[in-house]
Amino acid sequence: MSEFETDTAITPAGHGTYAALVTDRWNAIADRPNGGYLLAIALRAISAELHQPDPLAVSAFFLRPGLNGPATIHTSVVRAGRRISTGEARLEQNGKEIARVVASYTDLGQATGRTELLNAPPDLPAPEDCINPLAGGGLPGVTIADRLELRYAEVPGWFTGRPGNDPRSQFWVRFADGLEADPIALAALVDAAAPAVLDLGVMNSSTIELTVHLRGRPAPGWLACRVSTRHLIDGLHEEDFEIWDSKGNLVAQSRQLGLVTEKG
Amino acid sequence: MSEFETDTAITPAGHGTYAALVTDRWNAIADRPNGGYLLAIALRAISAELHQPDPLAVSAFFLRPGLNGPATIHTSVVRAGRRISTGEARLEQNGKEIARVVASYTDLGQATGRTELLNAPPDLPAPEDCINPLAGGGLPGVTIADRLELRYAEVPGWFTGRPGNDPRSQFWVRFADGLEADPIALAALVDAAAPAVLDLGVMNSSTIELTVHLRGRPAPGWLACRVSTRHLIDGLHEEDFEIWDSKGNLVAQSRQLGLVTEKG
């Protein structure tokens, strides 16, 4: 099993409750698991309760920082429908709720209807012609950086300590161990890269709410990402994220609201 | 009291439960209340349970079409915090859940921190120099059109039966009875205009999930809106919506995932 599958595995504990272990392999800062990783664990539990295979619309409210260690996920079915079903999960650690997740599921393989696009995939050179910003080594404490491979055409300034004041970037991503992403992995990946707002020179950002819309099952291969923050207002910012697969199809679109921490 | 305040009023029924009446004055199509209106009722109930005054991040999953008639809203406090609190509401009609809403609240008047914008308000002529697309009368069954005043610089083609294949537009909006919008009203208004995707010639769209981020308390006056759909994929589309107040500040930003109904 891949690292991601192993580290998001859930064990049924009856009555819609599941146990999981939040490992230290997906930390975004020292000792703090990435929110997208926690979301993936919650989605594994919701998946086990619904008939449809794929998350379609997902909203996660992050209530407290997560921890490395055991977690309990309480799920409930909100509505079981023929085409779309909706479930809810409360992810708890040490008796406190860390994240509240609501998700509607469908069978993305059965989706039919018209397609019209007013947007195009990120305009990136082939991954082998791009730059690996972590070629010189990982980031201290940021273990999630060891689980992913990133390739940039232009590396954002903050990576080298010189924020460029442009919180928009495009890059390739894939799992370092070769796992091909499924829709649950996409829901994690939209939150897996460092926040674009770092290029404004802020120290960090914590997610308040993250919505992911899964727009298709990804083809195998590198995933092209486009991320931007256009409005930082009173310390709060949105981050918009798109993931396009190797065939040039949009497969995930997300927005999160985050609160920045300024450098001390 | 204004129409909006009257029609979103809630009556406590004990233990976090509230009663409301879904009137027929905010119907988006015949006999079907607008989703944003239902969301506003749910937010009134969550507001009554939390200490902070303003919704900040709101996610609503629409499970079944709403009805004109009585509704019951069951609320629970997810987390009561010092700066941010989170609540949940289940809006039920005839014993069936219509909408599941999770919302984090804060005091938007107390928000402090850096502001950096990479976007500008919609570039619209003054409202008095714009076109009222409903000057010739309302739309049959669409009673919400009688509650709002709209002003366009360019009226989308679908308004006159000739879709222009451009699902992007900008317009002014305000309540017809003079009510000045508060953040809960903004959460309704992001869903109150006809979907931009109509300009692709589809018959209608039903919302699966709607996320609203409230970015500030609006100044009095007309509100400038920017709406777009950039990806219709297999019949599913996002709709992005921004509301800017009369002082040129972004006050609400939303995205919804909808499922289109084709004509014929």
Image: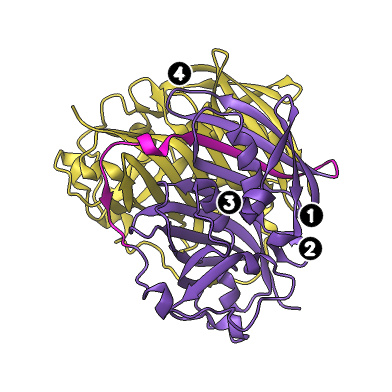
Chain colours: A purple, B yellow
Mark 2 lies on a secondary structure that is loop
The chain that hosts pointer 4 is B
Nearest to viewer (mark 3 / mark 2):
2
* Distance from the alpha carbon under mark 1 to that under mark 2: 7 Å
Where residue B56 appears, as percent x and y from the top left, is: 61, 50
Mark 3 lies on a secondary structure that is strand
Q: How crowded is mark 2: few (under 14 residues within 10 Å), some or many (20 or more)?
A: some
Choose the circle earlier in sequence order: 3 or 1.
1
Say whether marks 1 and 4 touch (CB < 8 Å).
Answer: no
Reading the image, the residue beneath label 3 is A210
User: Is residue A102 rendered magenta in the image?
Assistant: yes
Reading the image, the residue beneath label 1 is A67
Reading the image, the residue beneath label 4 is B68
Mark 4 lies on a secondary structure that is loop
Residue A31 tag number: 2
- Whether callout 3 and callout 1 share a subunit is answered yes
Residue under the point 54% across and 31% down: A86
Say whether marks 1 and 2 touch (CB < 8 Å).
Answer: yes
The chain that hosts pointer 2 is A
Nearest to viewer (mark 3 / mark 1):
1
Tell me if residue A105 comes above or below residue A242 in the rendering. Answer: above
Residue B119 tag number: none
